[in-house]
Image (spheres, grey):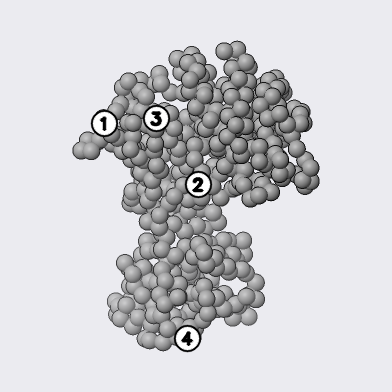
Amino acid sequence: MKKFAFMLLLLLFVVVLPGHGHAAGGSNKIFLDGKELTAGQDVPVENVNNSIMVPLRMIAENLGYQVNWDQKSKTVTIEQQGKTIKLIVDQTAASVDDKTVVLTTAPLLRSDTTLVPIRFIGEQFGLKVTWDNTAKVVNLITPEIPDSTNNTGESSGDGGTSVEVPPVDTTTNLTMVNGISFSENRLTIAMDGNSQPVVSKVTGPDRIVVDLPNATFSDVFGTGQVLSPDLNGAIAVTDYPDVSGVRYSLYSTNPYTVRFVIDLNQAKNYSVNVSGDVSKLVVVDLNAASTDDPATLPGNNGRKLVVLDAGHGAKDSGAVGVTGKYEKNFNLAVILKAAALLKQENMVDVVLTRSDDTFLELKERAGMANNLKADLFISVHANSGSSSAASGSETYYQRAASKALANVMHKYLVQATGLSDRGVRYGNFHVIRETKMPAVLLEVGYLSNKGDEALLFSEDLQNKVAAGIVAGIKEYLKL
C-alpha cells in the first residue's frame, strides 16, 4: 500500500502542468523502480545543458498534499509533509522551505507544458534519478532500506550507457543577501552570514566592484529588488553625479559569489565598513577621501546619526485607503522629504532603510539602525481603522528610553497635521522594540478616513510633517 501511495505521489512530480493534461508519446519514458509511469505527454523529455527536463501535469487533487500554479508569476508550489518547493518558469532561483536553491537549468515551457529538472524534484523527495541517454529513459529509484539479506548496492547494468544527471548546487551554509540600497553616496548591503566583502577599483570604465564570496541571493531579495531569471538586476541612481548606476548578479556558482558593481562617472575613492554579528550591513562609502578613511561613515566626526524608516514597501503595500491609495507610497514620500531637510543640518547624518519601493523585513530595518549604532530611529506610517470615522495622529514607543522622544515627536506631528490628537501610546511593534536607541513609530493619519486620506496625500501636509519630524529631531538632540 505504501508503495502504491508513493507511486501516486511521484506521478504528480512527473506530470503536473499549469493547464490541461496532454497524452504521452515518443520514445521518452519515465520509470519508477523499474515500472513505467504511463502518464504519457505530447512534450518529450529533454536533456537541456545536461539537466533532464520532464513535463509536469496537475493530476491529483486528493493525494494528501497541495500543488498550486500561479499563472501570472508562472510559479509552481508543491507542499508535501511539511516541505515546500517553489519553481518559477525561466528562473534558475528556486526555493526549498524558503531557502534559495540555484538550478543548473531553469524550468521552461513547451507547448503550454512546464518542464522541470527531474533530479531536483526527485532528490527533494528522496529519489535517485538517472538518465539513459541511449534509450531516452528517466529512471527514478526509491532508496531501499538495507537489511541482512540484501545489501549489495547498485549496479548500472547498462553497459555504460546510463548517464547520471549532475547534482543541483544547493545553498547550504551560504551567506544570504537580503537587500541593497543606495543613498547619501553609499551602497548598503544587508546580509545574513559570514561572507567578507572583497572590494576593488576598476578602470575602463571606472567602477567599484564588490564581491561577496560564499553568498547567494535570499528569497527576500527578489521580493524587494528586481531579479531577472538569470539572477541579474540593477537599481537606478539619480541625483548623485559620481554614480550612473548599481548592478548586481549571482556572478558564479563555483564557487558561489554575489557581485555588485557601482558604475562611476569618474574615478572615486571609497571606504568599506562591515557591522553586525549574524545579520550584517556592508557599507561602501564613496564620500571617503581615501580607501583608508572611515571618517565619512554615518555618525562619525561628532555628527548624530538618525535612521528614517518608511514603513512597508514593494509587495507589502501597508494600509489601502478608501480611494485605493497605498500607505507605502505616503510613508516614502514623507521620509524622502524629511531626509532632504536633514541633509541641510551640519550636525546630523541620515540613513534611510529604503529610498524607493523596495521590501525589507522588519528585522533588517531594526538591524540596520543597530549595526550603524544610530542615535535615533523614526518610522513613519499611516493608520487604518474598522470605522471610517476614525481620524487623527498618534505616536508609539515601546521602551521607556523612547518615551521622551515620543513626546517631543508627537508634539510636532499634531501641529503639522492639524488632525485630532490621539496621544502618545505604548505599542509592541518590532522596529521600535528591537532597536537599541530611542525609537518611535508615527501614525500620521487614517487612510480609512476619506478626509484624512486626501490630506495625507497632499504635498502641503507631507511637507509640514517632514518639517515637523526634523524639528522634533533637532529639539530632542538639542541641536
Q: CA distance from mark 1 to mark 2?
A: 29 Å
Pointer 4: what residue?
23
Do tag 2 and tag 4 residues touch (Cβ < 8 Å)? no
Q: CA distance from mark 4 to mark 1?
A: 60 Å
> Toward the viewer: 401 or 327?
327
Q: CA distance from mark 3 to mark 2?
A: 20 Å
Q: CA distance from mark 1 to mark 3?
A: 14 Å
Q: Residues within 10 Å of mark 2 (few under 14, many from 20)?
A: many
In percent of width and height, residue 34 lies at 46, 82
Residue 185, label in figure:
3
Mark 2, secondary structure of its residue: helix
Mark 4 residue type: Ala
Pointer 2: what residue?
224
Q: How many marks?
A: 4
Q: Earlier in the sequence, mark 3 or mark 2?
A: 3
> Residue 185 falls in which quadrant of the image?
top left
Mark 1 residue type: Gln
Q: Residues within 10 Å of mark 1 (few under 14, many from 20)?
A: few
Q: Quadrant of the N terminus?
A: bottom right
Point 61% across, 37% down: residue? 458
Q: Residues within 10 Å of mark 4 (few under 14, many from 20)?
A: few
Q: Quadrant of the C terminus?
A: top right
> Residue 331 falls in which quadrant of the image?
top right
Pointer 1: what residue?
266
Mark 3, secondary structure of its residue: loop
